[in-house]
Image (tube, coloured by chain):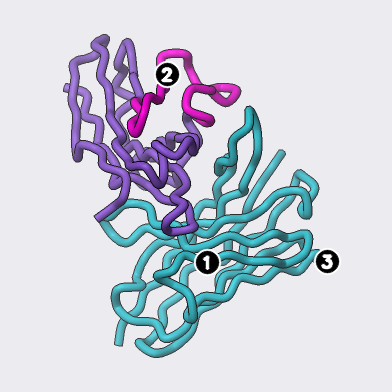
Amino acid sequence: QVQLVQSGAEVKKPGASVKVSCKASGYTFTSYYMHWVRQAPGQGLEWMGIINPSGGSTSYAQKFQGRVTMTRDTSTTTVYMELSSLRSEDTAVYYCARGSYGSGSYYMDVWGKGTTVTVSS
Amino acid sequence: QSVLTQPPSVSGAPGQRVTISCTGSSSNIGAGYDVHWYQQLPGTAPKLLIYGNSNRPSGVPDRFSGSKSGTSASLAITGLQAEDEADYYCQSYDSSLSGYVFGIGTKVTVL
């Protein structure tokens, strides 16, 4: 079955960087885009960006441009999201979500369980 | 502030019908971009509930339905059940932002 398995929780100090992984299985890795979405405590969902695992092209939300880097490793069917210059407001659960297409529409059909990132001094 | 506006909360008794609105603008829903809905049960990851405005993925009960008109979309839950208590998010694409956007989320409470 289709699965997205994310890396474990992280605790980082302000100013540091964090790299979260998302290993995909159960489907052809290069046939589906991958989104990253985050959720701060008690808050809603916030889209961070998207990567095409086939060629590695990316598109980032304006808010995160310059601070986020999304990459992929096709040999291990894993995508990565690295966020730099962390601040307390980056404390959140980070999700990867598969981008799918159907009925003329693009949507996020499978989600990882999330990775908690805590930024604290 | 989200570019997609949802009511913070809605409630209903078991068996009742509730609706959640999602209001956008001419750069997202009004531009023709589809609306999708996600259900997030407490402490879990979001789950796709409705895609392409009104399509249900396999396994989603037909109690859930979606519609879109103009710059708005709606999610309806008929025959409300206790297990429907969750947060619901609408999502679309915004051409001004060149990115995907979510509503702020609506908490559904079953009385």
Labels 2 & 3 near each other (Cβ < 8 A): no
Report whether mark 2 lies on the same chain as mark 3.
Answer: no
Q: Earlier in the sequence, mark 1 or mark 3?
A: 1
Q: Hey, which quadrant is residue A55 in on the image?
A: bottom right
Instruction: Give percent across and percent down for residue B21.
Output: 28, 30
Helix, strand or loop at label 2? It is strand
Between marks 2 and 1, how big is the CA–CA gap?
A: 31 Å
Q: Hey, which quadrant is residue A89 in on the image?
A: bottom left
Q: Colour of chain B?
A: purple
Between marks 1 and 3, how big is the CA–CA gap?
A: 24 Å
Q: Residue at x 22, y 24 (%)?
A: B110
Name the chain under label 3: A
Pick the front one: A66 or A99? A66
In the picture of the structure, the residue carrying the numbered disc 1 is A60
Q: Residue at x 36, y 28 (%)?
A: B70
Mark 1 or 3, which is nearer the eye?
A: 1
Q: Amino acid at mark 3?
A: Ser
Above-or-below relation of B60 to B79: below
Instruction: Give percent across and percent down for residue A79.
Output: 66, 65
Above-or-below relation of B38 to A96: above
Label tally: 3
